[in-house]
Image (spheres, coloured by chain):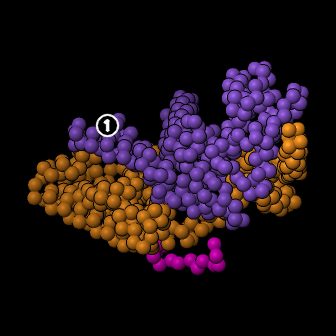
């Protein structure tokens, strides 16, 4: 039930290709994006620490002679890590930083055109007020002594409004996304799974279902059943088999749950697909 | 009872057969497309043979048509999901127009950057005017009451300078170059200034108010410093000290402020466009301007960190500063590369 509800709320947006097919892109939710961002921060921090350690060893090895060139290299590298990390990766072919790749999301242009480099730059420069400004206020190094507690609290609330901006709009856009005309979408890599209705089960011959028995369910239930079969959890299979058995008036043995469901899935799918070909898409068990 | 059951099973089997053969026949194409995509996403398209390159759009269209068929006829969720993900990957790859790095750089320096700056001329004027007002205000405040100096310029930044500092000491600060650490200093100045410029730009999002304040305050600091030197008869010398890098740096900061004001004002007053479209449009122009600003600040950092410490003649300092200003203005406003065709 909970999953059905989530599917209804899932942020799906149309994306019509020039060929006229709607690809129905799915927007990444705030949690996924936050985890991608945290991963990136970890990568940046690790890289910064490694660079610093190497530079310190360099100074140790070269002595004061090498200090200046090393300092220049160090400060430029840290600068690029902070400012260019996101831009370089998002301007690449995959339009995603390593953190985004790991969680399977990417940046895309809201208009559906190709993502251009100025969009990537615009969305990432705004991180300055979304991330670094709140941080600098929290750390309290705002540079002046003018800030007392009240102004710090005020500043924090104000900057958190920027940081939490994605939670306040329908398309989960950061301020950077808003200004660049981009959004972040799910771009998972999926493997082609086996066709469940082609599965041959030795015990399958024992089951036959009548027209009435196949009419008990619709497409939504079929998809749930597919999910259960693919997960292949013994207890879930048994519970579902019992429920279906009760509904359609068949009583499979407990150890027969899997073959029973496999056959029922295959027949139900064929039944519903046949209806589909005849122009009747039966959404769920309540539909006629 | 047996007859309808058998009949139903047979009809179902026929549908099942045809869908299974659909998948069997198309599967090789999908796999081939997936493999090609995995390759081009990792490495440049150059590594593909001509034949593979030509097959890419064909395989993409085949995957799309399979998706349409599957959506209309199949209830296998995993299959439809797979085809959706594959088509989306293909779409992003094939329609994400990509230009080579050299082409992009050329476009940026010949067209995008100067065009963005020209587009921002109104905001640039406003931002320069704000700075000038700030300079006037800063000078006037310090002239009317010396204690304003400490309030405007934080002690750490003043570095011992103040209304009560002697003229010799003030003069010394203008010409003392410590030659030990120039390139490091230049690199530090560059990164610091870019960070400030990005902040000035990003703050523009709050309806440009913080950016306006930042521009005014920036001017105030210069004005306060100027007043201190002017009152000791060192105005010209301070001018040279500032001008050598200041023409580039202050111009860049003004442009960053202008970019910030543009996004702030287009969100507040989107005009005929929707607020979203106006913001997106302003953001892209501003982004181009900001990349240019960091290039300008790179020059400013080099001039400040190295040039100012080694060149101590006022005339040369003014000359370099003025020259840079002429160069920037000429490049932004006078130089116009003709754009051939559609880009």
Q: Measured from the top left, where is residue A19 in percent x and y? A: 72, 65
| Left or right: where B63 falls relative to A204 | left
Residue extending furthest toward the front? B1
Q: Where is residue B163 in the image (x, y as percent from the top left)?
A: 16, 52
The chain coloured orange is B
Of B118 and A273, which appears nearest the observer? A273
- Whether residue A215 sits left or right of residue A79 in the image: it is right
Q: Which residue in the protein does label 1 denote?
A: A140
Name the side, left or right, on which B171 lies relative to B85: left
Nearest to the observer: residue B106 or residue A258:
A258
Label 1: chain?
A
When asked about the image quadrant of residue B329, the answer is: bottom left
Furthest residue toward left? B144
In the rendered image, residue A162 lying in the magenta stretch gets the answer no
Question: Quarter of the image holding residue B311?
Answer: bottom left
Q: What stretch is highlighted in magenta?
A: B329-343
């Amino acid at each position: 039930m909970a999953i059905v509800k989530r599917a209804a709320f899932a942020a799906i947006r149309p994306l019509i290709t020039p060929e006229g097919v709607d690809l129905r892109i799915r927007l990444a939710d705030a949690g996924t994006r936050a985890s991608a961002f945290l991963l990136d921060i970890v990568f940046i921090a690790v890289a910064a620490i490694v660079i610093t350690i190497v530079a310190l060893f360099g100074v140790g090895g070269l002595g004061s002679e090498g200090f200046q060139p090393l300092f220049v290299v160090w400060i430029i590298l840290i600068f690029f890590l902070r400012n260019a990390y996101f831009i370089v990766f998002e301007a690449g072919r995959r339009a995603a930083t390593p953190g985004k790749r790991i969680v399977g999301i990417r940046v895309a242009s809201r208009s559906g055109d190709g993502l251009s480099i100025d969009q990537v730059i615009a969305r990432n420069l705004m991180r300055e007020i979304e991330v670094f400004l709140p941080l600098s206020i929290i750390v309290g190094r705002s540079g002046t002594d003018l800030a007392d507690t009240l102004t710090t609290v005020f500043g924090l609330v104000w900057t958190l409004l920027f940081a939490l901006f994605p939670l306040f709009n329908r398309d989960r856009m950061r301020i950077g996304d808003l200004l660049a005309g981009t959004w972040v979408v799910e771009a998972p890599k999926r493997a082609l799974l086996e066709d469940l209705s082609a599965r041959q089960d030795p015990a399958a011959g024992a089951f036959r279902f009548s027209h009435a028995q196949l009419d008990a369910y619709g497409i939504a239930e079929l998809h749930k059943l597919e999910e259960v079969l693919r997960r292949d959890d013994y207890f879930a299979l048994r519970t579902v088999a019992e429920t279906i058995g009760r509904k359609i008036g068949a009583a499979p043995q407990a150890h027969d749950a899997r073959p029973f469901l496999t056959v029922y899935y295959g027949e139900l799918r064929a039944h519903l697909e046949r209806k589909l070909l005849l122009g009747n898409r039966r959404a769920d068990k309540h539909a006629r | 009872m047996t007859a309808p059951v058998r009949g139903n099973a047979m009809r179902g089997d026929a549908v099942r057969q045809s869908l299974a053969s659909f998948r069997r026949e198309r599967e090789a194409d999908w796999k081939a497309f997936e493999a090609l995509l995995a390759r081009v996403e990792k490495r440049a398209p150059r590594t593909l043979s001509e034949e593979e390159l030509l097959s890419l759009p064909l395989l993409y269209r085949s995957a799309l048509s399979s998706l349409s068929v599957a959506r209309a006829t199949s209830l296998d969720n995993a299959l439809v999901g797979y085809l959706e993900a594959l088509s989306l990957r293909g779409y992003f790859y094939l329609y994400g127009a990509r230009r080579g790095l050299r082409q992009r750089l050329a476009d940026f320096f010949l067209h995008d950057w100067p065009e963005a700056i020209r587009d921002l001329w109104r905001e640039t004027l406003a931002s320069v005017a704000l700075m000038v007002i700030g300079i006037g205000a800063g000078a006037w405040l310090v002239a009317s009451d010396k204690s304003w100096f400490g309030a405007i310029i934080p002690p750490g930044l003043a570095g011992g300078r103040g209304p009560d500092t002697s003229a010799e000491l003030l003069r010394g600060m203008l010409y003392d170059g410590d030659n030990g650490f120039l390139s490091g200093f230049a690199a530090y100045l560059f990164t610091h200034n870019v960070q400030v410029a990005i902040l000035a730009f990003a703050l523009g999002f709050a309806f440009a108010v913080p950016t306006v304040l930042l521009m005014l305050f920036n001017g105030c600091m210069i004005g306060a410093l100027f007043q201190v030197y002017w009152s000791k008869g060192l105005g010209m010398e301070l001018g040279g000290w500032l001008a050598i890098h200041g023409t580039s740096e202050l111009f860049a900061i003004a442009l960053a402020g202008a970019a910030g004001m543009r996004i702030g004002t287009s969100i507040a007053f989107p005009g005929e466009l929707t607020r979203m479209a106006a913001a997106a449009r302003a953001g892209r122009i501003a982004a181009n301007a900001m990349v240019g600003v960091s290039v300008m600040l790179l020059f400013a950092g080099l001039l400040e960190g190295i040039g100012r410490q080694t060149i101590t003649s006022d005339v040369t300092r003014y000359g370099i500063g003025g020259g840079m200003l002429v160069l920037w203005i000429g490049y932004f406003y006078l130089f116009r590369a003709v754009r051939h065709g559609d880009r």
